[in-house]
């Protein structure tokens, strides 16, 4: 029987902590995913306008295997400054790649989305303190969704975007989950019926009454400068190599492409990271490719894609209207 985890979110993965810093006046924020003991990580960038940090270190042939955190942030290129606070906080806690004399170098990849011009100032006053505060608030509790963290200023097509999460427990008892800040050029809602494209992925009535609504979409804003991007993390408690983590990140993009249409456009910087904490072995699977555990990896990647689709829907239905952006909950019924 298919089922979500107990918290239906990224913090269902043991060893993963999530923290948000939200500035409602700036209409921007930071989300940090912390794994103090380190997680094997991969990344896949599909959008044509990405803003990223330390993604090259995740290339399978490069040296470092593990990351201590991944940052998702608003603020476009200015948002990368939040990573400095995350890196300093991790170093002070002793989490990172070991150096001489007891020092560590935390590995902190990041991706940004465009939310400029949505708050009191065109450029939000994002800085290292935002990243540090997100770390200080990180924990394994259920994750606040909607207008929180990196999803605070997000816009999804013509309606309010946001931060969403979802999880899934496989028959092997391996857990996989997704966390995503939804700010795409495309739409999460099918204009033909007013319902989310991937509403059929719902598990255990997780979308509640909002999942039964069909809404009338407002007009989409006029085309302008690049102002989009959906960024996220999928995580699992499985043992993965760096190439396997990269493959799961690639497959998770399928869930984004199903839930947001179109996605991966010239105006998006769509980026997904994968983090594996290594607490459960992938099950052996029969066949020619038994050594690579290929079938088990297929199932994990498929589940990651479905989690991504569900997390995207959660981001939109949990958001509230802010800064002239109308949320799903405030749209008229069809």
Image: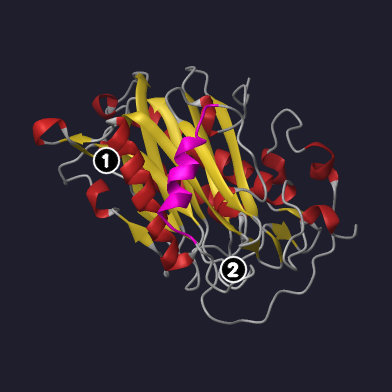
Residue with the mark numbered 2: 185
Q: Quadrant of residue 201?
A: top right
Residue highlighted by disc 1: 106
Residue at 54% across, 62% down: 263
- At x 38% / y 59%, what residue is drawn? 81
Which of these two is toward me, 119 or 163? 119
**Can I make out residue 246 in this image?**
no
Residue sitting at 49 percent across and 43 percent down? 134
Q: Residue 249 location in percent, x, y? A: 40, 45
Report the magenta stretch's main SS. helix
Q: Earlier in the sequence, mark 1 or mark 2?
A: 1
Q: Quadrant of the C terminus?
A: bottom right
Q: Position of residue 152 (x, y in %)?
A: 62, 55
The reply to whether dot 1 and dot 2 touch (C-beta < 8 Å) is: no
Say which of 148 and 11 sits in front: 148
Q: Is residue 132 magenta?
A: yes
Instruction: Specify the quadrant of the image occupied by residue 280.
Output: top left
Q: On residue 184, which mark appears?
A: none
Image mark count: 2
Left or right, residue 314 beside residue 218? left
Q: Nearer the viewer, residue 132 or 143?
A: 132
Q: Which residues are magenta?
A: 126-140
Q: Secondary structure at mark 1?
A: loop
Is 162 on the left or on the right of 266, as rendered?
right
Q: Would you place residue 30 above or below residue 17 in this image? A: below
């Amino acid at each position: 029987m298919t089922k979500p985890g107990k918290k239906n979110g990224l913090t269902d993965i043991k060893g993963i902590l999530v923290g948000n810093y939200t500035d409602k006046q700036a209409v921007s924020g930071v989300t940090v995913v912390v794994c103090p003991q380190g997680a094997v990580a991969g990344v896949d960038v599909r959008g044509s306008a990405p803003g990223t940090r330390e993604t090259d270190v995740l290339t399978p042939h490069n040296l470092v295997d593990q990351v201590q955190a991944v940052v998702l942030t608003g603020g476009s290129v200015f948002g990368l400054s939040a990573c400095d606070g995350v890196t300093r906080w991790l170093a002070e806690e002793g989490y990172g790649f070991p150096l001489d004399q007891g020092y560590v170098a935390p590995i902190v990849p990041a991706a940004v989305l465009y939310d400029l011009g949505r708050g009191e100032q065109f450029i939000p006053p994002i800085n290292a303190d935002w990243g540090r505060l997100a770390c200080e608030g990180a924990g394994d509790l259920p994750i606040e969704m909607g207008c929180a963290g990196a999803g605070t200023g997000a816009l999804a097509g013509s309606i309010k975007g946001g931060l969403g999460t979802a999880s899934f427990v496989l028959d092997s008892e391996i857990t996989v989950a997704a966390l995503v800040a939804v700010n795409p050029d495309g739409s999460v809602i099918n204009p033909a019926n007013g319902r989310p494209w991937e509403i059929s992925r719902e598990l255990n009535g997780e979308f509640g009454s909002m999942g039964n609504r069909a809404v009338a979409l407002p007009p989409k804003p006029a085309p302008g400068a690049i102002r989009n991007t959906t960024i996220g993390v999928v995580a699992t408690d499985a043992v993965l190599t760096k190439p396997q983590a990269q493959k799961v990140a690639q497959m998770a993009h399928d869930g984004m492409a199903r839930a947001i249409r179109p996605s991966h456009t010239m105006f998006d910087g769509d980026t997904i990271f994968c983090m594996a904490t290594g607490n459960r072995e992938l099950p052996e699977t029969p066949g020619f490719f038994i050594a690579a555990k290929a079938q088990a990896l297929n199932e994990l990647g498929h589940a990651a894609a479905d989690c991504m689709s569900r997390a995207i829907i959660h981001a939109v239905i949990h958001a509230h209207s802010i800064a002239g952006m109308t949320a799903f909950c405030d749209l008229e019924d069809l």
